[in-house]
Amino acid sequence: MKIYGTPPTRVIKALWLLNELRLEYELVPVALLEGEHLRPEFRELNPAAKVPVLVDGDLVLPESSAIAIYLAEKHPESGFMPETLEGRAQVHRWLYFLNSEIEANLWRIAKHEFIYPEESRLPAEVALATKDLLKMLKVLEEHLQDRECLVAGKVSVADFVAAYLLDWANEAVGFADLPNLARFLDRMYERPNAPARIRESRG
């Protein structure tokens, strides 16, 4: 398998699953600042020109959460995807929540803080996205009040995706008032196969 991307981008979601599953893979760095994601050979893999992209035989799969789900389902012996329909439904519920309510707001903040050209950045968008993000983080905070994992008391693919996004959220807004999220984050990154945290990857 090959995985295209460079930490601390969302390739971390895929790398975490690959490491947890102890799979052999080749990490192919993609220098975003140098525009490598815009080159024709990369756009053949992902017309959206975004990382990560997983290549597994004939399968070419972009989108970080889709890659994480694929790896978990390809290796059911890991237990990272529940066996029951109800359990899988809950995993998907939280994955969709994470993508639409947490990641979307983090990406919105990042765009208006440093990704867009300076003349296109809107401070009001940062403020609104931060407000929406904090509201949704509180939903997760309450859900993890008496739980160590998002679904059924066992680590699932949803927890790995959540951990990366919550690490990003911690960088953006801090978890001083979100102790359950802070504890969840520490537990996940204490796992032996956890990747480096975002701050460490930047270093």
Image: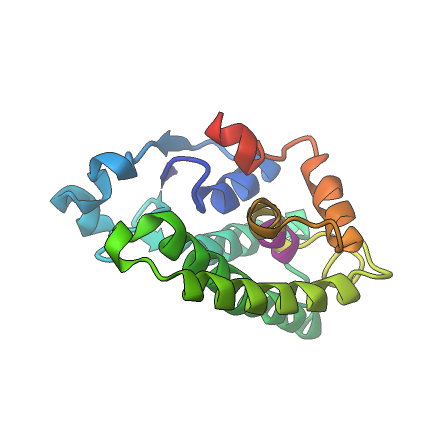
Which of the 4 image quadrants contains residue 138?
Answer: bottom right
User: Residue 45: x percent and y percent?
Assistant: 24, 49
Which of the 4 image quadrants contains residue 94?
Answer: bottom right
Q: Observer-nearest residue: 133 or 2?
A: 133
Q: Which residue is at a point 36% across and 47% down the rendered structure image?
A: 114
Q: Observer-nearest residue: 57 or 118?
A: 118
Reply above or below: 100 against 202: below
Which of the 4 image quadrants contains residue 144?
Answer: bottom right
One can see residue 99 in this view: no
Secondary structure that dominates the magenta span = helix
In magenta, the rendered stretch is: 158-162
One can see residue 63 in this view: yes
User: Residue 170: x percent and y percent?
Assistant: 62, 47
147 vs 116, left or right, is: right
User: Residue 119: x percent and y percent?
Assistant: 25, 55
104 vs 28, left or right, is: right
Q: Residue furthest top?
A: 203
Q: Residue furthest right?
A: 146
Reply above or below: 116 against 125: above
40 vs 171, left or right, is: left
Q: Residue furthest left?
A: 40
Reply above or below: 142 against 25: below
User: Residue 22: x percent and y percent?
Assistant: 57, 34
Q: Which residue is at a point 72% across and 52% down the rendered structure image?
A: 155
Residue 131 magenta-highlighted? no
Residue 159 magenta-highlighted? yes
Q: Quadrant of the N terminus?
A: top left
Q: Which residue is at a point 68% across and 62% down the rendered structure image?
A: 82
Q: Observer-nearest residue: 188 or 20?
A: 188
Q: Which residue is at a point 52% across and 57% down the rendered structure image?
A: 69
